[in-house]
Image: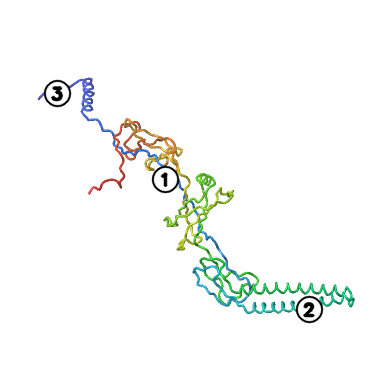
């Protein structure tokens, strides 16, 4: 049996460091973490705004009964397009024709009275010259003639009114457009005491979209030039309307309660796809910014206070944290207003591995859509 050797504790502590140094020295150094980057781009960007609005007809005409009477017939197809001057309704003309005939008779009587008075005046003038009648009688004849002529004018005005009312019995479209349903049916008494609503005609091509914008954004819009500015209509389902429009005008004042200004855009609507009352959004070009620095949105994280931050690869391939100020969001990119220069390398992948100030192994970022097919 061999004797057991005991080493002093001090000798054991002397051996431990030596073993550790040997182990550390024997392990290879860790490689720098791999990251991908994109260079910050400098480009001309178009800044747009999507603003809520509502579709409105360019012209709306309420068809109302202008005379009282029984509605005889409706002579249009509900929901169809009508032209200005097309006959829509027919009100019973018989009572109005009787009034017209009475006015004609009154005019004839007034003209006969005026003729008789004129003849009387002529006779009186001859008799006055021979002192056969008094001057007073001659003056009375002149006055009677003036009254008779005035009654002719009254009778003519009454006839004109009667003919107008008879014409109103045939109700026509004042404008061209799309007509809705009839508000009354045949046999109804219309125009008795008020102008009964019969139907509504709306001009739908082109069509308006009224929308609102802040007064601050309106100033930027005016600086960019508001005359005939193009506009895109976004429908309720998020799709873009096929035809482009244009911004027409803005209200002269700002709503004191909301600080908003009403704008109006006009869009062609030949197929009547857009109907009054529909909700939509109008996309307008707010400004065009040249030499703007942009980076992908996924490369930017939010720091305290709402500032943006991102990781860069410097010239010595070390990761650096940079605080930036973001502006507009253009598609999937941020416009960087301060804190970044064009062509600086912004880390896209490898954030968790890269530490600020540490060495990294950078490689250009390749989007998934640009990567070659593995098959």
Marks 3 and 1, how far apart at CA: 80 Å
Disc 3 secondary structure class: loop
Q: Secondary structure at mark 1?
A: strand
Find disc 2 in the rendering and name its residue.
116
Residue at 42% from the left image edge and 41% from the top image edge: 335
Q: Residues under labels 3 and 2: Cα distance?
A: 166 Å
**Residue picked out by circle 3:** 4
- In this view, 62 is above or below 133: above
Q: Earlier in the sequence, mark 3 or mark 2?
A: 3
Work out whether 287 lies above or below 53.
Answer: above
The numbered mark, 1 or 2, whose residue comes first in the sequence reads 2
In this rendering, is residue 164 above or below 374?
below
Using residue 232 as the reference point, say whether residue 133 is left or right of it: right
Q: The N terminus is located in which quarter? A: top left
Residue 256 or 56: which is nearer the viewer?
Answer: 56
**Residue 50 x %, y %:** 47, 50
Taking depth in this image into account, of 131 and 356 the one nearest to the observer is 131
Q: How crowded is the residue under tag 2: few (<14 C-alpha within 10 Å), some, or many (20+)?
A: some
The image position of residue 297, as x and y in percent, is 39, 43
Which label is found at residue 330? 1
**Residue 328 at what x, y percent from top left?**
44, 43
């Amino acid at each position: 049996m061999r004797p057991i050797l005991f080493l002093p504790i001090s000798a054991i502590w002397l051996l431990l460091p030596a073993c550790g140094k040997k182990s550390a020295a024997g392990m290879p150094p860790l490689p720098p973490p791999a990251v991908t980057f994109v260079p910050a781009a400098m480009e001309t960007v178009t800044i747009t705004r999507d603003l809520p609005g509502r579709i409105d007809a360019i012209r709306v005409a309420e068809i109302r009964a202008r005379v009282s009477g029984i509605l005889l017939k409706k002579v249009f197809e509900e929901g169809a397009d009508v032209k200005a001057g097309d006959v829509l309704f027919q009100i019973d003309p018989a009572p109005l024709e009787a009034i017209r005939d009475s006015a004609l008779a009154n005019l004839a009587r007034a003209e006969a009275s005026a003729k008789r008075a004129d003849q009387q005046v002529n006779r009186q003038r001859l008799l006055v010259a021979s002192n056969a009648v008094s001057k007073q009688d001659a003056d009375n004849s002149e006055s009677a003639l003036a009254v008779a002529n005035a009654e002719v004018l009254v009778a003519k005005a009454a006839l004109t009114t009667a003919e107008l009312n008879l014409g109103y019995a045939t109700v026509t479209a004042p404008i061209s457009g799309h007509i809705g349903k009839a508000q009354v049916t045949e046999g109804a008494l219309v125009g008795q005491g008020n102008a009964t609503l019969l139907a509504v005609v709306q001009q739908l091509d082109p069509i308006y979209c009224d929308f609102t914008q802040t007064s601050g954004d309106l100033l930027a819009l005016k600086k960019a030039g508001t005359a005939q500015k193009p506009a895109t209509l976004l429908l309720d389902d998020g799709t873009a309307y096929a035809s482009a429009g244009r911004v027409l005008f803005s209200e002269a004042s700002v709503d004191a309660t909301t600080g908003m200004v009403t704008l109006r855009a006009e869009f062609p609507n030949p197929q009547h796809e857009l109907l009054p009352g529909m909700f939509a959004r109008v996309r307008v070009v707010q400004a065009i910014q040249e030499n703007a620095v942009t980076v992908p949105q996924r490369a930017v994280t939010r720091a305290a206070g709402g500032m943006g931050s991102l990781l860069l690869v410097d010239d010595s391939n070390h990761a650096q944290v940079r605080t930036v100020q973001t502006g507009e969001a253009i598609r999937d990119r941020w416009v960087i207003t301060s804190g970044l220069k064009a062509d600086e390398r912004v880390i896209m992948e490898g954030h968790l591995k890269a530490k600020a100030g540490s060495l990294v192994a950078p490689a250009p970022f390749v989007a998934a859509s640009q990567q070659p097919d593995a098959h």
